[in-house]
Amino acid sequence: MEKKRAEFSIFMDAPRDRTGRLDYGLMPLRTTIPGSRWYFCTIGTCGSGPAIAISSERTIFFWESSVLLFMVFDLLMDPGINVAVQTFSVPVTALFTQGEFLDSMPWYFLIISLITFGLHPRFGVRLATVFGLNVGLNEAVKLFSHMPRPYWVSEAVTAYSGHSSFGFPSGAAMSGAVMYGYIAAIIRRWWVVLVCIILLLATSMVRIISGIHFALDILGGWVIGLLLLAVFLLLMPRAEEFAARLSRPVRLLLFIAVAAIPILLVIPAYLSLAGWQLPSAWANLALQQSGEAINPVRIQFAWGASGIIFGSLFGYEFLRSRGGWNPPQDLKQRAAVVVAGILSVLVVNAGIPLVWKTIGITAMIPQLAAFLSMAVVMFWLMACVPALAAKAGYTG
């Protein structure tokens, strides 16, 4: 007997909620089989609370992959998820919305410093390099996809901070997957892995509760970040062997080429948006919700990402030319280097932008200022702090 095939079609005149999104609680999906009628609603659209309800007048389970993908995609892009978690618990929301520092450069510098001074600079330079590549790739994908953030499209979502870049994929989720994934991969202690997982989940949840990212943005950030990390870990040993065989001048040229990768990734993505117009509804609602105007069609982070890679690689090369450095075996000495080193890195990170602003570089060439700021901070972290520690006798 020939199987019956159900073909789903979505009614374009289906009811919509006050934000303009389809109201799946009322919208049917019909099949070509007479008498069969499907209903489903996504999280945040059901009056009884978060749920996915599916029912039919006949128990006929013919699913078209395109419709199923649409349902999953639209569910993960539903601002109702943000609303649901924001209103779940006032104390929880208040706590998590204070966690935006988990996706800030001081926090990332702290982690890179901890790995560099606490384990070894070679681990630090690898982490800094893959982090810089991650920032460039994230911005490139954001520009190619040019998808909104929740508070740009829904009045129901509370915006606890404003962000001018596109939403997909989440930079915080992607950076967290790369950074915490790398740490878990090199240390391989159960408690370290557990801490890394907790930090990644906490960082991601902050973005959803703050109304900054859809669930799809977070999931995409995890997947792309872990794929990038896997490729990096696979290619890193061969790349280091290749670089070691080169003369120093050629190796320095290679470092410049690697540092340029974030910019080279982002430029085509930026050019692909030529002629694309930011929807006025996004711009108006974003301004209304956060009080900050958005201008996502620009290169914002790639210059700094290139500076991170440039300063890290050149700093590590300088350190090696001075004989290298190993963390002290004595735990008190090592702790002293870690604490003093982290504090100095945070001070340099806070002070260097003021220098560029004072001498006018920030106003004239902001891209150069961003590159130089990150390059100087990473050179200080990777070369100067270990060299000063060695000179003071804090070495292993």
Image (cartoon, rainbow, N blue to C red):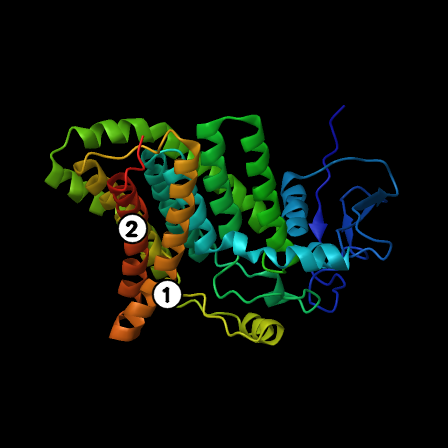
Q: Where residue 91 sits: x, y (%)? A: 74, 57
For the C terminus, the image quarter is: top left
Judge by depth and name the residue closer to the eye, 216 or 67: 216
Q: Relative to 393, is 97 above or below? A: below
Q: Where residue 122 sits: x, y (%)? A: 32, 34
Judge by depth and name the residue closer to the eye, 163 or 361: 361
User: Are the two marked residues, 2 and 1, in contact with CB atoms closer than 8 angstroms?
Assistant: no
The residue sitting at 76% across, 45% down in the picture is 31
Question: Between disc 2 and disc 1, whose residue precedes?
Answer: 1
Q: Is mark 1 on a helix, strand or loop?
A: loop
For the N terminus, the image quarter is: top right
* Circle 1: residue type: Ala
Q: Can residue 317 be seen in this view?
A: yes
The residue sitting at 43% across, 67% down in the picture is 276
State the mark number for residue 149. none
Measured in 3D between alpha carbons, the distance from the residue under mark 2 to the one under mark 1, in whole angstroms, is 38 Å
Q: Relative to 169, is 165 above or below? A: below
State the mark number for residue 380. 2
* Circle 2: residue type: Trp
Judge by depth and name the residue closer to the eye, 295 or 290: 290
The residue sitting at 56% across, 57% down in the picture is 100
Judge the density around disc 2: few (<14), some (14-19), many (≥20) Cα neighbours within 10 Å: many
Judge the density around disc 1: few (<14), some (14-19), many (≥20) Cα neighbours within 10 Å: few
Q: Where residue 283 sits: x, y (%)? A: 54, 73
Residue under label 1 = 274
Q: Where residue 178 sits: x, y (%)? A: 46, 40
Q: Is residue 323 left or right of residue 110?
A: left
Q: Is residue 168 visible?
A: no
Q: Is mark 2 on a helix, strand or loop?
A: helix
